[in-house]
Image: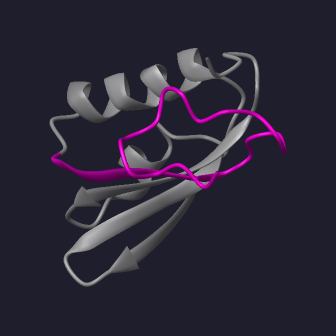
Amino acid sequence: MNDPTTSACYEIRVCGHLSRTFLSAFPGLRAESRGAETLLTGTLPDRAALHGVLGQIEALGLELIELRRCGGQPAGSRAGGERPGSRTS
């Protein structure tokens, strides 16, 4: 099982362009507009922080398009909690 205290990088795509007010709800994440979407990227320290970001997205009424883990897992650890087919071993 993944260590819940391990930092990981995430890419989170939401529908629409976020105002500065909305962006302030996601400190520590970088925002980039891509067409009609906003890409939030950054490293989150643990699963609780990820769930906090997802809760903010829901609370603000934003449409989540995609959540992708893009790295930060220690070398040699198993990807037990990831999607099927995402293992690299």
Q: Nearer the viewer, residue 42 or 16?
A: 42
Q: Is residue 19 above or below residue 22?
A: below
In-image side of 65 versus 44 (left or right): left
Q: Quadrant of the N terminus?
A: top right
Q: Nearer the viewer, residue 85 or 25?
A: 85
Q: Is residue 78 above or below residue 22?
A: above
> Secondary structure of the magenta portion, mostly?
loop
Q: Position of residue 56 (x, y in %)?
A: 35, 28
Tell me which residue sits at (46%, 21%) in the image: 52
Tell me which residue sits at (68%, 41%) in the image: 8
Tell me which residue sits at (19%, 43%) in the image: 62
Tell me which residue sits at (34%, 81%) in the image: 34
Q: Position of residue 36 (x, y in %)?
A: 19, 77
Question: Residue 20 sits in which quadrant?
Answer: bottom left
Question: Residue furthest toward the bottom?
Answer: 35
Judge whether residue 67 is colored magenta: yes
Q: Position of residue 26 (x, y in %)?
A: 51, 40
Which span is picked out in magenta? 63-89
Q: Position of residue 19 (x, y in %)?
A: 34, 58
Q: Nearer the viewer, residue 33 or 4?
A: 4
Judge whether residue 83 is colored magenta: yes
Question: Residue furthest toward the front?
Answer: 89
Q: Nearer the viewer, residue 40 or 85?
A: 85
